[in-house]
Image (spheres, rainbow, N blue to C red):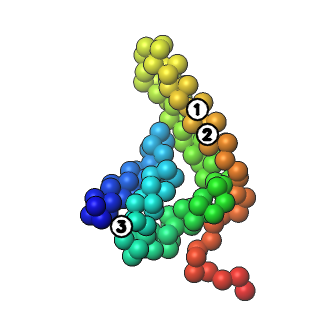
Amino acid sequence: MRSLYIFLGALSLGLGVLGIVLPLLPTTPFLLLTAALWLRASPRLYRWLITQKQLGPYIRNFQENRAIPLRAKIVSLLLLWGTILYCIFGVVEPLWLKLLLAAIAIGVTIHILSYKTFRKEPTDINSTNA
């Protein structure tokens, strides 16, 4: 079972990283799933993930505060709506598909905005306030 959790965690991490650049693929849920799977399977991998410079602060912040940094919200929503509007007005033909894309974008927007806003960027776990 341990090997399965490690594999699924790696797959989830890959999807989470892809979600950084693909607006309709969520990043945070996949990173949180990775953390949960690796916590059960490998304390070493879990520790690496939460201390990783780029992704770790977001995972820790979400676990501790259930909040999303303001910058992450803004970037996510800009990428989401930019991609959706491009698809609606430039790529997709059928009206029902345009409406579906708009509904998905509205749903994702509501979901993102439903979380508290963490006003300052998460800091590195190893940094100190001097």
Q: Badges 2 and 1: C-beta atoms under 8 Å apart?
A: yes
N-terminal-most mark, 2 or 3: 3
Q: Residue 91, relative to residue 65: is it above or below?
A: above
- Quadrant of the rendered image containing residue 94: top left
Q: Determine crowd level at label 3: few under 14, some 14-19, many 20+ residues with C-alpha closer than 10 A.
A: some
N-terminal-most mark, 1 or 3: 3
Q: Residue at image x 50%, y 73%? A: 51
Q: Looking at the image, is mark 1 or mark 3 nearer the viewer?
A: 3
Q: Using the image as rendered, state which of residue 27 and residue 78 is in the foreground.
A: 27
Label 1: which residue?
107
Q: Position of residue 25 (x, y in %)?
A: 45, 43
Secondary structure of the residue carrying tag 1 is helix
Q: Residue at image x 60%, y 53%? A: 72
Secondary structure of the residue carrying tag 3 is helix
Q: Using the image as rendered, state which of residue 120 and residue 112 is in the foreground.
A: 112
| Dot 2 amino acid type | His
Which corner quadrant holds the N terminus? bottom left
Q: Determine crowd level at label 2: few under 14, some 14-19, many 20+ residues with C-alpha closer than 10 A.
A: few
Label 3: which residue?
41
Q: Residue at image x 36%, y 59%? A: 9
Q: Position of residue 88 (x, y in %)?
A: 50, 23
Q: CA distance from mark 2 to mark 1?
A: 6 Å
